[in-house]
Image (cartoon, helix red, strand yellow):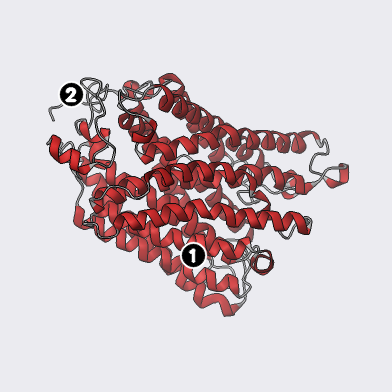
Amino acid sequence: MAEGTNYLTETRGLKSWLFTVDHKRIGVMYFWSIMTALFLGGVFAMLVRIELLTPRQTIMSAETYNRMFTLHGAVMVFLVLIPSIAATLGNFVLPLMLGAKDVAFPRLNLASYWIYVAGALFGLYSMIAGGIETGWTFYTPYSTSAGGGVTPMVLAAFILGFSSIFTGINFIATIHKLRAPGLTWFKMPLFVWGMYATSIIQVLATPILGITLILLLMERMFQIGIFDARLGGDPLLFQHFFWFYSHPVVYIMILPGMAIMSEVIPVFSRKTIFGYKAIAFSSIAIAVVGFFVWGHHMFVSGQSPLAGAIFSFLTFLVAIPSAIKVFNWLATMYKGSISLEAPMLYAISFLLLFAIGGLTGLFLGSIATDVHLHDTYFVVAHFHFVMFGGTVIAFLAGIHYWWPKMFGRMYSEKWARVSAVLVFVGFNLTFIPQFIMGSRGMPRRYYNYLPQFQPMHVASTIGSWVLGLGFLIMAGYLFASLRKPYDAPSNPWGGATLEWETASPPITHNFETTPAVTHGPYDYAALRSDA
């Protein structure tokens, strides 16, 4: 593609990026911002793992350790996991998949990005405002009495919520109003269905977090007795509010990852997706049922046996639509002509890791076993298998899948496969020992531990180094690809969705003419006949 004819080069200069309303440029800015946050969160995680090499102090004090794991959790959840797929790939790909020129509200889209940046800066400011030691959940009563760094971090999470809400509103309006002619609801790619379900949760659940955080700030500043038992408040009320948002937010993180799987797996299996409607409706089912399972985080909080039984039942119930997706993806792969390029390697990794995360969640959804496993390293491992093994691995699959479309360059497939293997091996070596430690009673977040757990902590730390090496190699070949001339064809993987009908990278307004949809998103036979 000639210089000056795509969205990357049509207008130049920093100002043209900072004030752009082009959804593709906004998606790219989100991408680099989130990658920066991922690097910081990874550094904090590495420091925590190095400290845990020995049962006593290794490289930092107990106070610094508390701050490191809190920063790791807060940065990864609020700055990486929640916005990663929706804000980056959703912004870039969703209008292209719909045959639209942009999102419904381009200026609101730009505002959502700058709100994200403002929230990130407030969060990082907490590091120099006294630090934060509460954990990323900000549990009371600790968060109402801890040091000054809690206030800017809580304010950061509050600000970031507006970015999430604005993005959700934009996507819902875009999906309803800007679909290309012929693109009916059941001809939409499943990525769009996943983003639609995610947006519903963003719009409905995020205000609950905002109210909760404002109440926490008021409690800290004015001691009005909402969560403070000395003033007639209830510290458990914070947990109910927080998890009523934060369990749906798990699906804000994982539903977009599932949506990516529904694009990558059929393309690299060369088969029409199995059970299109079942996968589409399961996304909506997850969005709905996910609002009613928050109490399984509080089985040991003293809630009534009846409430515990209901929440346990709902926890098992919400696993059903997720299982529907997994079985349909496997059925899609069955007897398919599977091609093991990097996106498919990450997709297979997702299936394995998310399955482990989901199955270990059944132990935590059962009251009897949760009493033993609650607040142990088993929970840490389960959470990371779902969030990293689900969201981050799917994000990597999506980045590799759409990288040629986003930047017009092909990366080194050989190094991409090496990196995918290292990430998979390193991740399992990091977190499988934590399942064992947790089942044997090792509490999470402890600075010191019994010497009997040291071999598993050492294995976990070595695994984190292997995982880090995989990411360093990934950064190397992706950056190297950006130095090459544009060499990506418009449809390098043979996809049938609309974004592959544009140039790589796309022009500013996406399509030369408004596309008309004449076949389904996974109709490869129609694609071959058109060619």
Task: Farthest residue to the bottom: give it.
Answer: 452
For the point 12% across and 36% down, which residue is it? 531
The residue depicted at 78 percent of the width and 47 percent of the height is 235
Q: Secondary structure at mark 2?
A: loop
Whole-percent x and y of residue 76?
50, 48
Toward the viewer: 374 or 14? 374
Label 2: which residue? 5
Real-space Cα separation, disc 1 to disc 2, in angstroms: 48 Å
Looking at the rendered structure, the kind of residue marked 1 is Ile
Check residue 3 in the rendering and tell me which mark sits there, or answer none: none
**Dividing the picture into quarters, in which one does residue 364 lie?**
bottom right
Classify 59 as above or below 34.
below
Kindly state the secondary structure of the residue where label 1 is placed.
Answer: helix
188 vs 141, left or right, is: left
Q: Is residue 484 shown left or right of residue 254? A: left
Residue at mark 1: 50
Left or right for 228, reference 84: right
Counting from the top left corner in percent of width and height, residue 360 is at 53, 64
Give the vertical position of 393 relative to 105 (above or below): below
